[in-house]
Image (cartoon, helix red, strand yellow):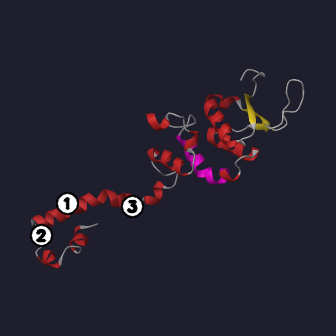
Amino acid sequence: MKAEQIQYLLPGVVQESLCPGSPLSALLDMMESLHQPSEDVIESIAMYFNPYTTPDAFVPFLARWVDIDRFFPEDYSRVRVAMPLSSGMGRLRELVMAAAHLSQWRGTSIGLIGFLETATGVRGFTIDEQTEDREGARRPFHLGVTAPVQAKIHRALIERIIDQEKPAYVTYELKFEGDNPGDG
């Protein structure tokens, strides 16, 4: 708000006594300078709600709005590390942008694969809903999730995502391409 705009908010008798170079004029100039940072933010407020344009420090805040913070490490809220996901800020921005779409597919293979690929930036996850035990009998309510070997560095993130995105009554086994059974 400019000093000239602030002056019209003052009582009429004070407005009449205002003259350039007076202490009141200096006070109005100071008020203008104090308002400027807030006005700059308000002028570009839309930037803060777009995960692609918001400052890095604001992305985790947006992630909380769309319930992505449940995939942050458990100690994130206490430690306040700079990056809550092992896959980087770009992946977190993508997750925030895709959150509404992914939530529609929650509990399905399509949703789980989409979430894993968006979170890690690695394509090629597969889900086997017809798993068998060592004797060849079908294992009901069990998923076999196979991840590309490039995603192995994000193992903890992948496990948190699977735990949260699979149906609650389902168990799972995670393996990476090229792993032998039991390598885990």
Judge left or right: residue 143 versus residue 134.
left
Which amino acid does the dot numbered 1 rest on? Answer: Met
Magenta stretch: residue 124 in it?
no
Residue under circle 1?
Answer: 30
- In terms of image quadrants, where is residue 24? bottom left
Where the N terminus falls, by quadrant?
Answer: bottom left
Prevailing secondary structure class for the magenta stretch in the rendered image: helix
The quarter of the picture where residue 10 lies is: bottom left
The residue that appears at 69% across and 45% down in the rendered structure is: 114
Sequence-wise, which precedes: disc 2 or disc 3?
2
Tell me which numbered mark, 1 or 2, is placed earlier along the sequence: 2
Q: Amino acid at mark 2?
A: Pro
User: Where residue 95 sits: x, y (%)?
Assistant: 60, 46
In front of the other: 104 or 1? 104
- Secondary structure beneath dot 2 equals loop
Rendered location of residue 64, percent (x, y): 52, 48
Residue 73 circle label: none
Is residue 158 among what the camera can see? yes
